[in-house]
């Protein structure tokens, strides 16, 4: 099974996923798609000899959504990708696009709810807990079927950065395994 990771930033989740599947080679990361030429994830790709594709907005939204370049992709992983996925791509990969969101959806999701914005909102609302949601991507922001959630406490003295660090630990611990389990589920259903 060939994964393509879409990312816009540091790439810590991409790093963990690449490492995990080096030890579980039935699944591999064949391509990293990025919409930010300065993103740290591009260094991670280079260090792991993984091809990269830097995309531009017009072709992604008004063009062919880079479908030709994704012909060898089985599943798309969104790991901190900040653009909404166009309908053409969702229809080309039905139930085969997986996103990670740094909060307990359906709360703290939707347009503009990404990165530190999420953690600031959680703190402002004095939530006692937060967490991660790994879900399938459909045409609505942060809306598709949940594959997995994990929780962590929110402490009174937390700031957005400290909460983000705790959330990252949860993401790094669970994301790759959830992907692996979903691939097994897809393989099982395709055999029925
Ligand atoms: N959507 C969010 O964007 C962040 C990406 O972090 P990284 O993988 O680039 O370090 C993660 O917290 C993810 O939940």
Image: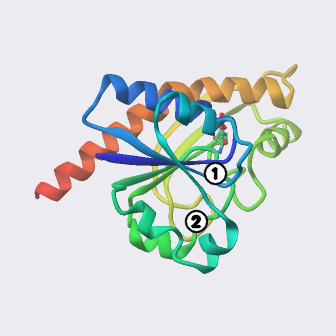
Circle 1 sits in a helix, a strand or a loop, which is it?
loop
Going 51% across and 66% down the picture, which residue do you hit? 138
Alpha-carbon neighbours of circle 2 within 10 Å: few (<14), some, or many (≥20)? some
Disc 1 beta carbon < 8 A from ligand 1?
Answer: yes
In the depicted structure, whether residue 77 falls above or below residue 17: below
Going 43% across and 33% down the picture, which residue do you hit? 176
In the picture, the disc for residue 81 is 1
Q: Quadrant of residue 168?
A: top right
Q: Quadrant of residue 101?
A: top right
At which x and y percent is residue 112? 78, 57
Alpha-carbon neighbours of circle 1 within 10 Å: few (<14), some, or many (≥20)? many
Going 84% across and 23% down the picture, which residue do you hit? 158
For the image shown, how many numbered marks are present on the structure?
A: 2
Residue at the disc numbered 2: 85
Q: In the shown orientation, is residue 179 left or right of residue 118?
A: left
**Ligand 1 rendered quadrant:** top right
Look at the image and tell me whether residue 58 can be seen. Answer: yes
From the image, which quarter does the C terminus lie in? bottom left
Going 26% across and 47% down the picture, which residue do you hit? 185
At which x and y percent is residue 15? 53, 29
Q: In the shown orientation, is residue 77 left or right of residue 122?
A: left
At which x and y percent is residue 11? 62, 35
**Viewer-proximal residue, 10 or 157?**
10
Q: Are marks 1 and 2 in contact (CB under 8 Å)?
A: yes
At which x and y percent is residue 84? 64, 64
């Amino acid at each position: 099974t060939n994964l393509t990771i879409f990312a816009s930033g540091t790439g810590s989740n991409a790093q963990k996923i690449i490492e995990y599947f080096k030890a579980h080679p039935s699944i591999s990361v064949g391509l990293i798609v990025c919409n930010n030429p300065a993103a740290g994830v591009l260094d991670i790709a280079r260090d792991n000899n993984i091809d990269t594709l830097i995309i531009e907005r017009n072709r992604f939204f008004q063009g062919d959504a880079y479908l030709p370049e994704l012909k060898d992709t089985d599943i798309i992983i969104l790991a901190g990708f900040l653009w909404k996925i166009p309908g053409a791509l969702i229809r080309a990969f039905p139930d085969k696009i997986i996103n990670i969101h740094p909060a307990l959806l359906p709360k703290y999701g939707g347009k503009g709810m990404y990165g530190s914005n999420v953690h600031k909102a959680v703190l402002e609302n004095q939530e006692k807990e937060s967490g991660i949601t790994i879900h399938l991507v459909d045409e609505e922001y942060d809306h598709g079927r949940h594959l997995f959630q994990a929780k962590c406490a929110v402490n009174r003295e937390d700031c957005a950065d400290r909460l983000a660090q705790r959330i990252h630990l949860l993401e790094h611990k669970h994301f790759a395994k959830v992907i692996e389990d979903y691939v097994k589920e897809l393989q099982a259903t395709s055999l029925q």
